[in-house]
Amino acid sequence: MTSSTKPQSNLNKFEKFKAEKDGLAVKDELKHFAEIGWEAVDKTDLEQRLKWLGVFYRPVTPGKFMLRLRVPNGILTAAQMQTLAEIVQRYGDDGSADITTRQNIQLRGIRLEDVPDIFAQLKAVGLTSMQSGMDNVRNITGSPVAGINGDELIDTRQLVKDVQDMITNSGEGNREFTNLPRKFNIAIEGGRDNAVHAEINDIALVPAYKDEKLGFNVLVGGFFSAKRCESAIPLDAWVEPQSEDVVGLCRAILEVYRDRGLRANRQKSRLMWLIEEWGVETFRSEVEKVYGKPLATAAPEDEINWDKRDHIGVHQQVQPGYNYVGLHVPVGRFMADTMFELARLAEVYGSGEIRVTVEQNAIIPGIADDKLEAFLSEPLLEQFSIDPSSLTRSLVSCTGSRYCNFALIETKQQGFKMAQDLDAELDLPERVRIHWTGCPNSCGQPQVADIGLMGTKARKDGKTVEAVDLYMGGKVGKDAQLGDRVRKGIPCDELPGVLKDILMEEFGAQPKA
Ligand code: SRM
Ligand code: SF4
């Protein structure tokens, strides 16, 4: 059953507009929109359906749209990065790009009338933005060092791409999966350090040996929302690491979610709510029916048994004589010039590839030993350091109020400044991962951080001020676990002092000599 034929009752407004016209339908209207101008576009098409194409109207910057791409497994070619740089460049100071917490890229400053051209440019280099927003499957994440990491168990690159191609009809758009009850996240991890935060995805495949054979254990139902956050739970299933099985299983889970997922209340529509309503055994057997063959039971344990790495700095690849170098991109933000430069460096020194991470940083792989020294003296590395100071190194931030109308606070700029200031004051014995998120939607994943900061408002001296709720105790890598809110409503101007105390009391920070 496709989404459009699903019988609906008690439809909420999102279900109604999806039933009236599929989000993907606006793809054929882009030229018309370009002619009439964004102000004349139907409100639902403008503010909602365009997101099916990755085109986001930004109420904070009307007329300057955000374009969310898909970057499967976080891997881009230099030519793709160059194209993205060219797109952003035409918008001058309005043009920029962000690496997202899903190992993806978003472009800013985009004019709606340019979108048809931009889509042609993207297609020419094999990129797509289809189905990257609203009730669709988001960018599919994988280890950013897939295929180059000596300790890898499964190279996920092709698998991630195959799953994306199935969902998006190779980037052209696929109406089979454009009317899910809600957004949906998939991660496929092939390494031991859980680079993808498997536990916070609706489907996560994690490496596991079953009867000495390597494959994936399957976790389901992880999600964050303003109402509730949950870690994924075991489906008690194991799949072989072949495209047919991995794609088939993802398809089966998506079909069950699409056709049977809860749609009445958007606050209770993510996959976990369905799993809970049915019980995981029933969910598993419904998936198995659609999968069309018996699902193997899970391996007793998975192979996620390392601490999480951040990939910054120089690392030897599995290919002898080659290195990958992780560059710290402060709060994930690029301008056209830095994107051109990254593309150039990847071509001149590396294998012509750039990878991005869920920590919003970049990796250039394939740098031969004899080119390393010259690479490390390139001016871009002064901006995108391979040895950043402690707190800035592990800083992650969502978009915040600069561009996001849900935001209750500004995030990237003040987060970066606070990290820099505290780095200047304190010596830290180990990494402390601080994540900022501008509102309870949790795009900046404060629950996975050592210190998570979630935007809110507080009253101070009779005024409403920007503030944060404080989360602590998030663990990543092996034994990943979500942090909890431990304090509410800390005004942002008091935050540097609060963070300093926490860093000294709980993370062994010492004032610099
Ligand atoms: Fe998110 C909505 C940005 C990762 C949970 N998210 C939004 C919107 C689209 C809201 C809007 O229309 O303004 C934000 C766009 C702002 C902008 O202009 O950039 C937005 N989310 C982001 C990004 C860009 C944050 C970042 O700076 O990296 C991330 C883009 C990922 C991507 O490439 O697709 C991003 N969002 C996440 C994550 C993290 C993750 O996936 O690991 C989450 C929590 C995990 C999850 O979804 O389970 C997340 N975003 C949300 C939610 C709450 C979902 C829910 O079930 O309630 C919303 C609001 C919604 O969907 O109703 C939301
Ligand atoms: Fe916007 Fe809130 Fe997501 Fe930040 S967490 S990008 S403020 S929706």
Image (cartoon, grey):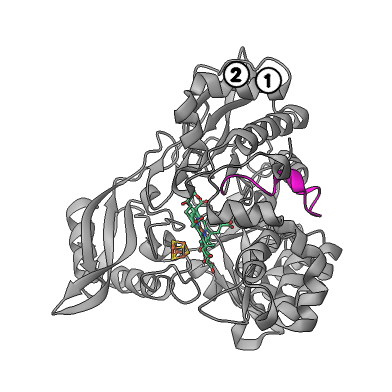
Expressed as whole percent of the image width and height from the top left, the position of residue 154 reads 66, 33
Q: Is the Cβ of the residue at disc 1 closer than 8 Å to that at disc 2?
A: yes
Q: Is residue 447 in sight in this rendering?
A: yes
Q: What residue did someone put label 1 on?
A: 289
Q: Which residue is drawn at 49% across and 30% down?
A: 275
Q: Is residue 270 positioned above or below 457 on the image? A: above
Query: In the visual, does 401 lie left or right of 490?
Result: right
Q: Where on the image, by quarter, is ligand 2?
A: bottom left
| Numbered disc 1: secondary structure | helix
Expressed as whole percent of the image width and height from the top left, the position of residue 437 reads 40, 62
**Residue 175 lies in the magenta-colored region:** yes
Considering depth in this image, is 361 or 376 the residue closer to the camera? 361
Residue stretch in magenta:
167-182
| Numbered disc 2: secondary structure | helix
Where does the N terminus fall, quadrant-wise? top right
Q: Which residue is drawn at 68% across and 65% down?
A: 50
At label 1, counting other C-alpha atoms closer than 10 Å, the crowd grade (few under 14, some 14-19, many 20 or more) is: few
Instruction: Give the residue type that dot 2 points to.
Output: Ser
The label shown at residue 285 is 2
Considering depth in this image, is 409 or 46 the residue closer to the camera? 46
Q: Residue furthest top?
A: 211
Instruction: Give the residue type that dot 1 points to.
Output: Lys
Expressed as whole percent of the image width and height from the top left, the position of residue 8 reads 61, 42
Q: Is residue 327 positioned above or below 65 on the image? A: above
